[in-house]
Structures are given as structure tokens and as C-alpha cells.
Image (cartoon, rainbow, N blue to C red):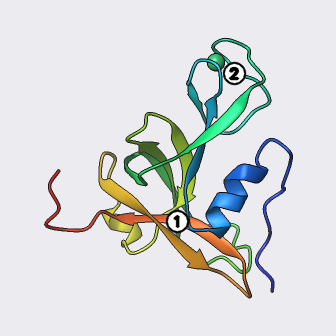
Amino acid sequence: MPHPRPGITRDNAFFWEGVARRELRIQSCGACGRLLHPPGPACPECHSFERSFVRARGRGTVHSYVVAHHPPIPPFEYPNPIALIELEEGTRLVSRLVGVDPDDVRIGMPVEVDFETVDDDFVLHCFRPAGRGEAA
Ligand SMILES: [Zn+2]
């Protein structure tokens, strides 16, 4: 069962090009600098269409999460923890959590981005518990 691919649009192409290079990119407004995720056509702050992006450091915390059990959809593994990550940059994004028992996921837990090659050359971002021993 091949892994489903994201729907690429002109709005989000830069994001997925970044993921393919193992970079987490956030849309930024070319006029006022406001960060925006998920990507969109215009800045919600100043309505500029001038779009740019920044490369996120890839660190954040679990803002909210669910552990999916049903219905099992191949090729995903269950239970499947999916989190809304609050990035240090201030935007949030949805991501799969890896490297943690679903029962141990907690709101506020520090996480960091990682990238997995799913099949062939397809790369997906995920988040895992932040490395131990690192300064907070
Ligand atoms: Zn703006």
C-alpha cells in the first residue's frame, strides 16, 4: 500500500520542497514579516500577496494531540499519535509523533522535528521528544 501524498498547491509547494530537503519552512509575509501556517495566498495581517518563508528551528511543544485508533487506514500504524505542535516561532502545525509511547504523550512536552523517508524518495516530517540533556 503506497503512502498517500500531500496535495501540492501553489500556496504550499515551498513547504513540501522544504520537507524534501529536510527543512521545516514557515510562510512569512514579504511586507510585514508575519508568519503563517498553514500557508495561504495572502497575509492575514496586512493583506500583502508578497510571500516568502523562513526555515524553522524545528523545536516546539505539544499544544494538543489525539491518538487515532479507528478506523485503521493502511499504511498507517495504530495507535497513531497526531499532535498540534506549537513551534518556537509561534505558529502551529499538525504532525505525526514518533519515538514516544502514545500513553506517554503530554500537552506541553518538548518535541523536535525529524524527517522520515517513507517510500522511494518521499520524505515526511514528524516530531519526536526533544533530545535529553539539551538546555531548555
Ligand atoms: Zn503582512
Quick one: quadrant of the N terminus? bottom right
Q: Looking at numbered disc 1 in the image, what kind of residue is underneath it? A: Cys
The numbered mark at residue 44 is: none
Q: Is residue 80 left or right of residue 98?
A: right
Q: Nearer the viewer, residue 88 or 80?
A: 88
The numbered mark at residue 126 is: 1
User: Which residue extends farthest top?
Assistant: 46
Residue shown at the point (56%, 24%) measured from the top left: 34
How far across and how far down the image is residue 97, in percent?
A: 47, 65
Is there any visible trace of residue 78 in the rendered image?
Answer: no
Q: What residue sits right under mark 2 in the picture?
A: 43
Q: In the image, is the residue at mark 2 within 8 Å of ligand 1 by its beta carbon?
A: yes
How far across and how far down the image is residue 39, in percent?
A: 70, 38
How far across and how far down the image is residue 120, in percent?
A: 74, 88
Residue 22 quadrant: bottom right
Q: Nearer the viewer, residue 31 or 59?
A: 31
Q: Looking at numbered disc 2 in the image, what kind of residue is underneath it? A: Cys
Residue shown at the point (43%, 43%) measured from the top left: 87
How far across and how far down the image is residue 29, in percent?
A: 64, 26
Callout 2 crowding tier (Cα within 10 Å): few <14, some 14–19, many ≥20: many
